[in-house]
Amino acid sequence: MTRAHNFFAGPAVLPVPVLEETRDAIMNFDGIGISIMEISHRDKGFEKVIREAQEDALRIMGLSQDEYAVIFLGGGASLQFAMVPMNFLHKKADYVNTGEWASKAIKEAKLFGEVVEVASSKDTNFNQLPKNIKFSSDADYVHITTNNTIFGTEWKTDPDTGNVPLVADMSSDMLGIRRDYKKYSLIYAGAQKNLGPAGVTMVVIKKSWMEARAKQNLPTMLKYKSHVDAGSLYNTPPVLPVYVVNRTLKWIIKEGGLDAIQARNEKKAKMIYDIIDAYPDFYKGTVVNKEDRSIMNITWRLPTPELEEKFVSEAK
C-alpha cells in the first residue's frame, strides 16, 4: 500500500511498524486467539502491556519510578484542564497564555480558584513566546503549554519557576523534543498528537507532590491518587490506545531515544523553515522570533487567500 503524506496536526502519523504490530494484535493478541480489543484489562497479558508502557515512558524521559508515576486516562487533555486545578489549585496558580489550548486551560482553572495570567502573547496573536516572565513565589503551581499547534511556537527551554511546581500540557510535542523532565511536577499529553491514537491521555506525575498537595475530597475518578494507587487500572482503561502507545514507546527506544527523535524532527523542520526564509515575500512565516519556532508544527501564510486555497488544493 502506498501511504499518503499526512499533514494533520493530530491525529498524526504513526510509525509503520507500530501500525503493523497493532494490526496483528487486533486480529490475534500475543498469539492467544483473541483481539486486543476483546481482552480483559485484568488479563496478565494486558497488565504487561500497561506496565511496560509506564516503565518505557519513564525510561525515555530519564525519570525514576520511585519519584514519578505514569497513568493513562480518558477525556483527552481537555479533561486535564479541569483535573489539574481540581486537584492542586488551593489558592492561586500562575498560567502562561501562549495560544488556544492555554486559553482553554485558563478558563477551566478559573472555576476552582484564582488564576494569575503572568504572561501572554495574545496581543500579538500568539506569534511569539512571552519573555522575562515573573512567576508568583506563592503560587500552587505554574502551568505552561509547551507547543502550540495553531500558532507554531514551542518552548525550547524549560522555565525556571523556583520552588513552585511546574505543570505542562505537552500534547503536541511529548517525546518529540528533549526536555529536563525532572523540572516538572505534572505532565499531561493527549496521545493523538505524538504517541498513539485518540482516546488516551498520558499523565506523568511526581508522587511526592501528589501525596503532599492533592486534594482528597474529590470524586474518586477525578483524583490522580486513585489511578496512581491502582497502577492506572482503577477502571477499564482504553485498552487499544494504550497498546498503541506501548508500541510507539518501544519504537522510540529502538530508534535511539529522544536524541534521535529530536534530531530527526529538527532536520525535517529545517528543510521547511529554510524555504520560508529563502522566499519571505511569498511564504509569510507567522512566528516572529526564530528561537520560538516549533519543530513540531510549522505555520505560515501566503500573500492572498486565493493563493492559500490554490496551495492547499495542489498539495493534495
Image: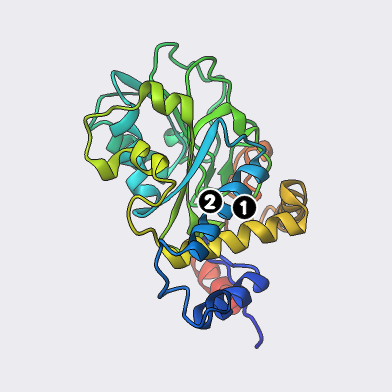
The crowd level at tag 1 (other Cα within 10 Å; few <14, some 14-19, many 20+) is many
148 vs 272, left or right, is left
Residue 302 in view here: no
Q: Nearer the viewer, mark 1 or mark 2?
A: 2
Q: How much space separates mark 1 and mark 2, taking CA atoms?
A: 7 Å
Name the one closer to the observer, 270 or 62: 62
Answer yes or no: do the residues labelled 1 and 2 have beta carbons within 8 Å?
yes
Q: Which mark is residue 172?
A: 2
Q: Which residue is mark 1?
A: 296
Q: Nearer the viewer, residue 188 or 4?
A: 188
Could you say where residue 248 lies in the image, as x and y percent from the top left? 61, 61
* Residue 178 to residue 195: above or below: above
Q: Residues within 10 Å of mark 2 (few under 14, many from 20)?
A: many
Q: Residue 289 lies in what quarter of the image?
A: top right
Name the element at disc 2: loop
Which percent across, then down, holds residue 266? 74, 50
Up-down: is 113 above or below 35? above
Name the kind of residue labelled 2 in the image: Ser
Across and down, in percent, residue 240 comes to 46, 68
Q: Which mark is residue 200?
A: none
Image quarter hosting the N terminus: bottom right
The structure's colour scheme is rainbow
Give the residue displayed 65% in from the left and 68% down from the top.
15
Q: In the rendered view, would you say 161 is above or below 59?
A: above
**Residue 300 visible somewhere in the drawing:** yes
Q: Is residue 89 left or right of residue 192?
A: left
Q: Earlier in the sequence, mark 1 or mark 2?
A: 2
Residue 284 or residue 212, whichever sits in front: 212
Residue type of the residue flagged with mark 1: Met
Callout 1 secondary element: loop
Residue 32: give x, y in percent of width and height: 53, 79
Up-down relation of residue 176 to residue 236 (above or below): above
